Image (cartoon, rainbow, N blue to C red):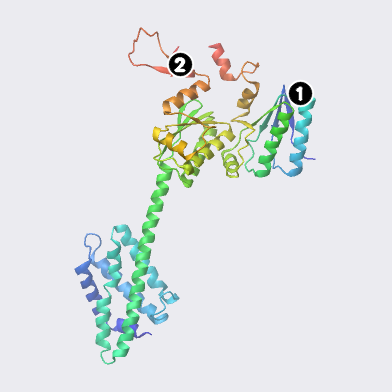
């Protein structure tokens, strides 16, 4: 089955010029890549197709002989996906080879209709297979993109902040899934150890919905913190979420919950034996702004 | 034979686990703790596991057992200094050690056991009273 290879190598220049001409009509993106680059890619792919059909035959597109063609195509597609080509534009790169190739086959095999049909069929299958490879590698490149962005989002979105000596806050934004909970939990526990904090406030104001799974993840985090000797307070429970929790029958009996972060902070201060007092007498109001300080700092102010 | 030391600090017992636990060692420790509590009339047991990097369900159960045994003998148990990885592992294993109290450090554990007004004061309390 190397007739196709012979036809291509005999008519290479003509096929390539027709191919690039066809492409320039439909999908050429002069804004994204230059003409010389396109020409290079075309001749490299034609050469790989010739080699592949010589070594492994036209029908064996998964064979070892096609490795070079497959790799080349994957590489081209990946670079195009990154440049911003659409999937159909990428697939058309291969599919627009059909017309010039078929024309060449017709010229060479006009004598025997049977033979021409057989070769045409082989070429069609081959080009469809190659087009499928481009689509698959296009999607793979995009998925890689998405996975990397998810990872970055994960690392950015779980800060642990120190509110006071021994009191941490962990504002959670976005839905809690298993992977995120793992990161949140590790972050929180590490910070509990490094700052020697007895209280951790988990603020769920930014969590859009709390279902049983999210609640379970929260309880896991709280249990792990308790095992290390830190107490967790959940804050930022919106009225809607409080209703959902009760309707779902989630048991948060053993967990301290508060409506607002400020309430939770006040509770943590109180439990660690500190009180918030206004400086000066109530009538003087010298500074105007209420300056509320607690614990060791309040003492320094005295 | 290898043995985990049980130290006496006033009315407390301090146990620091620094080696890999195995069955014999754990049984020996349970024996020692219960003996000491009844001998010395201790009211609290501090188990420091800050140098344990790896736990399994066996050690988890052992901690729960020691806590339960001490409670029967009238002593409160506090597990202190658990590492984050250890805590995560125990939670994933489904062992939340419900009967065991925990603290971040030995000092915090002591404070917890002595409670308020029992004569023990932490450094920050000293500072506050001096100020």
> As drawn, is A231 to the left or to the right of A67?
right
Question: Which residue has dot 1 on it?
Answer: B41
Mark 1 burial class by Cα count in 10 Å: few <14, some 14-19, many 20+: some
Residue A210 visible to an observer of this rendering: yes
- Circle 2: element type: helix
**In the rendering, which numbered label is found on residue A102?**
none
The reply, left or right, for residue A277 in relation to residue A109 is right
User: Residue at the spot x=76%, y=31% of the render?
Assistant: B34
Q: Quadrant of the N terminus of chain A?
A: bottom left
The residue nearer to you, when weighing A95 against B130, is A95
Q: Kindly identify which residue carries mark 2.
A: A298
- For label 2, count other residues whose C-alpha is less than 10 Å away and answer few (under 14), some (14-19) or many (20+): some
Residue B26 rendering spot, x and y as whole percentages: 74, 40
What is the spatial separation of the Cα atoms under label 1 and label 2, in whole angstroms?
42 Å
A96 over A269 or under it: above or below: below
**Horizontal side, residue A153 vs residue A252: left or right:** left
Chain letter for mark 1:
B
Name the residue rendered at 54%, 14% in the picture. B128
Where does the C terminus of chain A fall, quadrant-wise?
Answer: top left
Picture coordinates of residue B110, whole percent (x, y): 64, 24
Q: Residue furthest left?
A: A25
Observer able to see residue B17: no
The residue at 68%/43% (across/down) is B58
| A250 to the left or right of B101 | left
Residue B43 sits in quarter: top right
> How many badges with numbers are in the image?
2
- Residue A230: which quarter of the image? top right
Point out the frontmost of discs 1 and 2.
1
Q: Determine the secondary structure under disc 1.
A: loop
Q: Does the residue at mark 1 contact the one at mark 2 (Cβ under 8 Å)?
A: no
Q: Quadrant of residue A94?
A: bottom left
């Amino acid at each position: 089955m190397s007739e196709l290879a012979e036809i291509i190598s005999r008519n290479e220049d003509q096929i390539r010029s027709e191919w690039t001409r066809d492409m320039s009509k439909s999908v050429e993106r002069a804004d994204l890549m230059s003409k010389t680059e396109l020409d290079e890619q075309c001749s490299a792919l034609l050469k790989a197709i010739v080699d592949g059909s010589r070594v492994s035959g036209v029908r064996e597109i998964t064979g070892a002989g096609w490795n070079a063609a497959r790799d080349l195509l994957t590489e081209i597609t990946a670079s195009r996906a990154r440049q911003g080509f659409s999937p159909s534009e990428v697939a058309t790169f291969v599919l627009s080879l059909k017309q010039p190739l078929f024309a060449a086959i017709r010229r060479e095999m006009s004598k025997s209709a049977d033979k021409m049909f057989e070769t045409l069929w082989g070429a069609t299958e081959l080009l469809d297979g190659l087009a499928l490879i481009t689509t698959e590698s296009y999607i793979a490149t995009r998925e890689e993109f998405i996975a990397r962005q998810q990872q970055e989002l994960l690392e950015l979105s779980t800060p642990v902040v120190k509110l006071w000596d021994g009191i941490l806050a962990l504002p959670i934004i976005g839905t809690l899934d298993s992977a995120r909970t793992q990161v949140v939990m590790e972050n929180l526990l590490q910070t509990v150890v490094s700052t020697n904090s007895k209280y951790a406030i988990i603020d769920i104001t930014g969590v859009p919905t709390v279902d049983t799974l999210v609640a379970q993840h929260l309880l896991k985090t709280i249990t792990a913190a308790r095992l290390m000797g830190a107490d967790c307070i959940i804050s930022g429970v919106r009225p809607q979420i409080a209703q959902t929790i009760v309707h779902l029958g989630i048991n948060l009996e053993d967990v301290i919950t508060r409506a607002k972060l400020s309430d939770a902070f006040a509770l943590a201060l109180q439990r660690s034996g500190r009180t918030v007092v206004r400086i000066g007498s109530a009538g003087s109001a010298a500074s105007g702004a209420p300056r509320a300080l607690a614990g060791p700092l309040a003492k320094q102010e005295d | 034979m290898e043995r985990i030391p049980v130290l006496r600090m006033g009315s407390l017992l301090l146990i620091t686990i620094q080696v890999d636990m195995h069955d014999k060692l754990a049984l020996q420790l349970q024996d020692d703790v219960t003996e000491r509590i009844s001998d010395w009339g201790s009211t609290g047991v501090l188990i420091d596991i800050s140098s344990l990097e790896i736990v399994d369900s066996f050690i988890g159960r052992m901690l729960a057992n020691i806590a339960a045994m001490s409670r029967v003998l009238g002593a409160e148990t506090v597990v202190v200094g658990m590492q984050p990885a250890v805590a995560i592992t125990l939670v994933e294993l489904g062992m939340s050690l419900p009967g065991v109290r925990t603290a971040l450090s030995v000092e915090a554990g002591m404070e917890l056991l002595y409670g308020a007004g029992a004569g023990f004061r932490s450094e920050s309390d000293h500072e506050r009273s001096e100020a």
